[in-house]
């Protein structure tokens, strides 16, 4: 999963729809920091959560 996620990309959390759209801030190993519209900055472990990329 980490291989194609990079800063600036837009993502959604599959289990937290109310967080809204998130923008990837940084990726370090399996940990990714995302700034979500309604949840702020959240650090996510990609070994446990598969973020959904937003295209278009």
Image (cartoon, grey):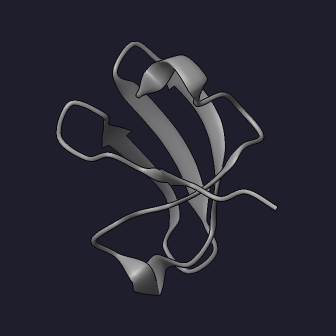
Q: Is residue 46 above or below residue 2?
A: below
Q: Residue furthest top?
A: 29
Report x, y in % for residue 1: 41, 28
Q: Residue at x 73, y 57 (%)?
A: 55
Measured along the vertical axis of the image, is residue 14 above or below residue 18?
Answer: above
- Residue 44: where, in percent of width, then height? 34, 43
User: How far across and how far down the image is residue 19, in percent?
Assistant: 47, 77
In depth, the one of 21 and 52 nearer the eye is 52
Q: Is residue 49 above or below residue 16?
A: above
Front residue of this view, candidates 50 and 19: 50
Q: Residue furthest right?
A: 56
Q: Which residue is at a point 58% across and 25% down the rendered structure image? A: 4
Viewport quadrant of the C terminus: bottom right
**Horizontal relation, residue 8 to residue 28: left or right:** right
Q: Nearer the viewer, residue 38 or 20?
A: 20
Residue at 34% across, 66% down: 14
Image height check: is 41 above or below 27? below
* Residue sitting at x 41%, y 81%: 17
The residue sitting at the bottom extreme is: 18
Q: Is residue 50 left or right of residue 23?
A: left
Left or right of 26? Residue 9 is: right
């Amino acid at each position: 999963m980490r291989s194609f996620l990079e800063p600036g990309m837009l993502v959604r959390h599959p289990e937290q729809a109310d967080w809204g759209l998130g923008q990837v801030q940084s990726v370090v190993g399996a940990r990714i920091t995302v700034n979500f519209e309604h949840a702020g900055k959240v650090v996510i472990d990609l070994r446990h959560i598969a973020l959904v990329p937003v295209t278009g």
